[in-house]
Amino acid sequence: MKITTWNVNGYRAVLKKGFGDWLRQDDSDVICLQEVKARPEQIEEIYRSWDGYTAFWNPAERPGYSGVALFTRIPPLETGYGLDDSRFDSEGRVIWLRFPKFTLFNIYFPNGQRGQERVEYKLDFYAQLLELCGGLHNHDQKIIITGDFNTAHQEIDLTHPKQNSNTSGFLPEERAWVTRYLENGFTDAYRKLYPERIQYTWWTYISNARARNVGWRLDYHLVSNTLMDSVRAVTIQDQVMGSDHCPVTLDID
């Protein structure tokens, strides 16, 4: 089973940049998109879903902002939206699907770069999600959290860690929350498989950063520890253009 996450930075925009061609070539079973910035009724019918896929959308209430979508070729047993908290759910940040062997969360974590209030909002979001996942783990349910975490966890996960030590996305308190997930039943699948590999999933549009590979690894698959033996590979598709992020694919038995 292949599960791909991609922050497309505008679904309507990425449609014009070869998204359909990529999807047909990629052949993932589940596609988790973040920052779609659109409601399904704004999308031409032929692009709301794709041949062989069922689409699920959770747009933000605010037009042109945030939002997640998910396309799956494998029918879920159950589907849900949000974290059951009005503080977060109006921003369209979560879709979850329950499959026979695990529950998959497609998450667009908040960005904290608009000030301390948004940093606190982001940390509260991390806390709310972890509490929800803890309840599932307590009932022996396995989980995959995939999406744009908006945090680089370790110094290896960005080009200039020292220069960004006071930048949201690499603040100590943000990184500590990722660590907390790893201390509570989750594994960063990519870093477990490739402990010393340096690859990024996001590059600013400023200063030709992508061409120079000055980037951050912000897009993750966190997998329940009890699922890690089933993970075969994690592939960062850093050659795929169309957004300031690139797709990241989890290959799991």
Image (cartoon, rainbow, N blue to C red):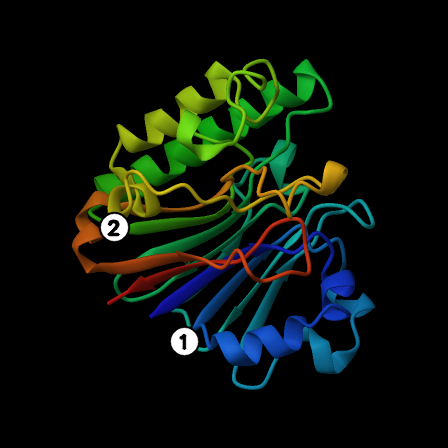
- The dot on residue 189 is none
Residue 41 percent across, percent down from the top left: 79, 68
Task: Tell me which amino acid carries mark 2.
Answer: Gln
Q: Is residue 183 left or right of residue 151?
A: left
Say which of 154 and 196 sits in front.
196
Q: Quadrant of residue 108?
A: top right
Can the viewer see residue 222? Answer: yes
Locate residue 137, reporting x and y percent: 25, 42
How far, Cα to Cα, is label 2 from label 1?
19 Å
Q: Secondary structure at mark 2?
A: loop
Residue indicated by mark 1: 74
Q: Is residue 154 visible?
A: no
Q: Is residue 219 left or right of residue 244?
A: left
Q: Amino acid at mark 1?
A: Ile
Residue 124 pos. (x, y %): 53, 24
Residue plotted at (58% across, 62% down): 240
- Image point (71%, 77%), residue name: 47
**Badge 1 density bin: few <14, some 14–19, many ≥20, Cα 10 Å:** few
Residue 141 - label: 2
Identify the residue at horizontal 64%, vertical 32% (top origin). 111
